[in-house]
Image (cartoon, grey):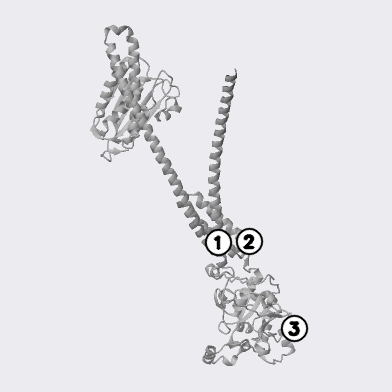
C-alpha cells in the first residue's frame, strides 16, 4: 500500500505544481496588462503636464494687463444713457475771435491751448446757470480753473452758481507734483475731484489708480459713487465721442436745446477735439473729455475689466489642456483635428463672450497656443502609439498568415494523401462487387463503396474551400450555355436520384449565352441538385428551371423535402453551417451552400432561398448577362 500511497501523493504534488504554474501565468499576464496601462497613463499625464506648463508660460505673454486687441475686435458698444457731453468751443469763450478764423487756425497750429484759454467768467456763469435750471443730477467741469485764470472777482450771484453742490471742479498736479486746487473749491473740498490720467510705459492710458489720489478722483466726485479700492482699475473702452450724446455749449446758452433731455443726467463739460492734448487709448486718440466719459460709463454701470486670481486661470488651462489631450489620444487623427479646431474656436468665443458680457478676462492667446502645442506633443505621442500598434498588428498578421499557411498545407496534404488510398479502396470494392464469389458480402461492399464515395466528396469540398480562399484563386470567364451545364449536372446526379426513386423535372427556357466560369457554375448547379435530392423524401420530385429576366439569367431548384426553419434561412449560407433540425441520417460538411453563394457572388450574381417547414424549399441564383470586366478576375 505504501508505493500506491506515494504515487497518489506525488500526483497531488504535480497537480498542485501545475495549478501554481497556471496561477503565476495569469498573474504575469495581468501584470503585463497593468504595466502597459500604467506606462500609457504615466506618459499621457507627463505630456499633459508639460503642455499645461507651456500654456502657463504663454499666459505670461498674453494680454494680462493690456486688452487693446479685444477692444478693437469687439468694436464700439453703446455707453450709459445717463451721461451727456457738453462741448465748449473757442468761439463761445472768445467772441473777439469769431471774425478772425484764419488767425485762430494759425494759432491752433503753432501752440497748445491750456485750460485757462477757455475761461470767460460771464460765459461760464451763463452756461452753468442754464445747466442748473435743466435740473441735471450732476455737472462735472473737466477743465482746471485755478491760479491759471488769475484773480477773477465774482459777484455773490455768480458765486452761488460756481459753488453749487451739483458742480464738481477738476483739480490737478503741476509739473513739480504740486496739487492745484480749483478756484471755486469749497472749504471741505467736497466739490473737487483730482483729474489724474495715468499712462502706461507705452504712453497709452488704460487704468485708473484710485488709491494714489490725495483727494477723490474726479470721476468719483462727479458720479458720487466710490471707486473700487483694489489697485488699478482697467478701463473698459466701449465708445468714442460719436457714440456719446453731445450738446454744444453755445446752444445751451442761446436756449436752442431741449431742457428735458438734460434732466436727471450726468453732464460732463469738456472741449472740442484738437483744443486739448490728445491722449492715446486702445481705441486710438481721444480728448480728455472722451476719456473721462469712458471712466464715467465704467463707474456708473460697474463695467471695469476684472481679472481673476492666477490659480483660477491655472485650473482653467489645466481643464482645457487635459480635455484636448484626451480627445487627441482617444480618436483618430482626422476626427481629433476637426474637434480640436472646433474646441479652440469655442474657447476663443467663450473668452470673447465672457469679456463682453461679464467684463471678466479669460486668456485667449494662451489657450489657443496651448491647444496647438498640445496637438503637437500629443499628436507625436499618438503617432508613436499607432506606429507601435501597426508594428504589433503586422507581426500578428505575419504570424497569422504563417499559421494559416501551415493549416492549409496540412489540410491539403492530408486531403491529397487521403484521396489515393480512398481511390484504391473504391477500386478494390468495385472489383469485388463484380466477382461472383463475393456476392454474399455484397451488402457490406455496397455500404463500403457508399462510405468511400461520401468520404471522397468531403475531401473534394475541403479542397474546393482551400482553393477559393487562396490568394491566388482566379475565375476564368468564357462564353457558355447555362442550360448545357444544367443537363450535364442532371446526368451526373441521375444515379443518386434513381437510388432514392426521385424524378428530376426540367423546365429550361432558351437562354442567351453568357460569360462565366464553367467549372464554378457547374459546381453551383451540382451542389443545389445534390442538396435537393439528399433532403427530398423517397419517391418525390425535384424541379429545376432556368429562365431570363431583364439582363440576368435565373436558375431555380425546388425540392419536396421537409423544408427549412425561418431562423435557419440566413444561417445555411454560412461556412460549416447546417440546419438546426439536421441529424446523423443526413450527412454533410456544411460547405455546399457556402460555396454556392461564394461562386455566384464572384460572378456578380445573387442567391436566394424560400422555404416553409413541411413544404420543401426553393434555392435560386442569378447571373448577369452583361459583364463589365471580361478579363480574368483575381480574388
Which circle's residue, 1 or 3, is located before the other in the chain? 1
Examine the rendered structure and indicate whether residue 296 appears above or below residue 549: below
Element at badge 3? loop
* Label ID, residue 474: none
Frontmost residue, 414 versus 226: 414
Which comes before the other along the chain, label 3 or label 2? 3
Residue 514 falls in image quadrant: top left
Residue drawn where x is 41% and y is 22% of the image:
563
Where residue 186 is drawn, which disc sits there?
3
Mark 2 residue element:
helix
Query: Which residue is the site of mark 1?
Result: 55
Reading the image, the residue beneath label 2 is 311
Other residues around mark 1 within 10 Å, as few (<14) / some (14–19) / many (≥20)? many
Q: How far apart are labels 3 and 2 at the CA level?
A: 47 Å
Taking the image as drawn, is residue 526 in sight?
Answer: yes
| Rendered residue at 30%/22% (across/down) | 420
Quarter location, residue 582: top left
Q: CA distance from mark 2 to mark 1?
A: 13 Å
Amino acid at each position: 500500500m505504501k508505493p500506491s500511497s506515494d504515487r497518489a501523493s506525488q500526483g497531488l504534488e504535480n497537480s498542485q505544481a501545475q495549478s501554481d504554474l497556471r496561477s503565476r501565468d495569469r498573474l504575469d499576464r495581468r501584470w503585463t496588462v497593468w504595466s502597459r496601462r500604467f506606462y500609457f497613463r504615466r506618459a499621457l499625464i507627463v505630456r499633459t503636464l508639460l503642455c499645461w506648463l507651456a500654456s502657463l508660460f504663454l499666459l505670461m505673454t498674453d494680454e494680462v494687463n493690456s486688452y487693446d486687441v479685444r477692444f478693437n475686435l469687439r468694436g464700439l458698444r453703446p455707453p450709459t444713457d445717463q451721461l451727456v457731453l457738453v462741448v465748449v468751443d473757442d468761439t463761445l469763450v472768445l467772441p473777439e475771435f469769431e471774425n478772425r478764423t484764419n488767425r485762430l487756425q494759425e494759432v491752433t497750429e503753432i501752440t497748445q491751448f491750456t485750460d485757462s484759454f477757455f475761461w470767460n467768467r460771464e460765459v461760464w456763469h451763463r452756461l452753468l446757470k442754464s445747466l442748473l435750471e435743466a435740473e441735471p443730477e450732476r455737472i462735472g467741469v473737466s477743465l482746471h480753473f485755478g491760479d491759471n485764470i488769475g484773480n477773477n472777482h465774482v459777484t455773490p450771484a455768480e458765486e452761488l452758481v460756481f459753488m453749487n453742490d451739483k458742480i464738481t471742479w477738476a483739480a490737478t498736479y503741476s509739473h513739480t507734483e504740486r496739487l492745484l486746487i480749483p478756484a471755486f473749491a469749497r472749504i471741505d473740498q467736497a466739490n473737487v475731484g483730482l483729474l489724474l490720467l495715468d499712462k502706461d510705459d507705452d504712453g497709452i492710458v488704460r487704468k485708473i489708480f484710485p488709491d494714489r489720489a490725495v483727494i477723490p478722483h474726479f470721476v468719483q466726485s462727479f458720479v458720487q459713487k466710490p471707486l473700487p479700492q483694489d489697485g488699478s482699475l482697467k478701463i473698459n473702452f466701449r465708445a468714442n465721442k460719436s457714440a456719446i450724446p453731445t450738446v454744444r455749449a453755445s446752444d445751451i446758452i442761446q436756449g436752442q436745446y431741449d431742457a428735458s433731455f438734460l434732466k436727471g443726467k450726468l453732464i460732463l463739460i469738456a472741449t472740442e477735439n484738437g483744443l486739448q492734448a490728445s491722449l492715446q487709448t486702445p481705441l486710438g486718440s481721444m480728448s480728455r473729455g472722451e476719456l473721462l466719459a469712458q471712466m464715467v460709463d465704467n463707474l456708473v454701470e460697474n463695467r471695469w475689466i476684472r481679472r481673476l486670481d492666477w490659480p483660477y486661470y491655472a485650473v482653467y488651462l489645466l481643464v482645457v489642456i487635459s480635455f484636448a489631450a484626451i480627445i487627441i489620444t482617444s480618436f483618430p487623427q482626422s476626427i481629433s483635428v476637426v474637434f480640436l479646431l472646433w474646441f479652440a474656436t469655442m474657447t476663443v468665443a467663450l473668452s470673447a463672450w465672457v469679456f463682453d458680457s461679464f467684463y471678466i478676462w479669460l486668456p485667449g492667446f494662451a489657450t489657443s497656443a496651448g491647444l496647438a502645442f498640445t496637438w503637437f506633443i500629443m499628436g507625436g505621442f499618438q503617432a508613436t502609439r499607432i506606429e507601435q500598434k501597426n508594428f504589433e498588428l503586422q507581426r500578428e498578421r505575419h504570424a497569422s498568415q504563417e499559421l494559416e499557411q501551415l493549416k492549409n498545407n496540412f489540410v491539403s496534404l492530408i486531403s491529397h494523401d487521403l484521396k489515393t488510398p480512398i481511390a484504391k479502396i473504391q477500386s478494390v470494392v468495385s472489383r469485388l462487387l463484380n466477382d461472383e464469389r463475393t456476392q454474399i458480402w455484397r451488402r457490406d461492399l455496397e455500404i463500403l463503396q457508399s462510405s468511400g464515395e461520401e468520404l471522397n466528396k468531403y475531401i473534394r469540398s475541403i479542397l474546393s474551400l482551400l482553393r477559393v480562399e487562396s490568394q491566388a484563386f482566379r475565375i476564368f470567364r468564357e462564353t457558355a450555355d447555362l442550360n448545357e451545364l444544367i443537363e450535364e449536372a442532371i446526368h451526373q446526379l441521375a444515379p443518386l436520384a434513381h437510388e432514392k426513386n426521385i424524378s428530376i423535372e426540367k423546365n429550361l427556357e432558351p437562354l442567351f449565352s453568357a460569360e462565366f466560369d464553367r467549372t464554378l457554375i457547374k459546381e453551383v448547379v451540382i451542389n443545389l441538385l445534390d442538396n435537393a435530392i439528399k433532403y427530398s423524401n423517397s419517391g418525390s420530385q425535384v424541379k429545376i428551371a432556368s429562365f431570363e429576366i431583364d439582363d440576368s439569367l435565373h436558375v431555380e431548384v425546388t425540392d419536396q423535402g421537409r423544408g427549412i426553419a425561418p431562423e435557419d434561412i440566413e444561417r445555411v449560407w454560412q461556412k460549416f453551417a447546417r440546419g438546426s433540425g439536421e441529424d446523423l441520417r443526413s450527412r454533410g460538411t456544411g460547405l455546399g451552400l457556402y460555396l454556392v453563394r461564394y461562386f455566384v457572388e464572384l460572378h456578380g450574381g445573387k442567391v436566394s432561398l424560400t422555404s416553409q417547414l413541411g413544404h420543401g424549399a426553393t434555392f435560386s441564383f442569378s447571373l448577369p448577362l452583361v459583364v463589365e470586366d471580361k478579363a480574368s478576375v483575381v480574388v
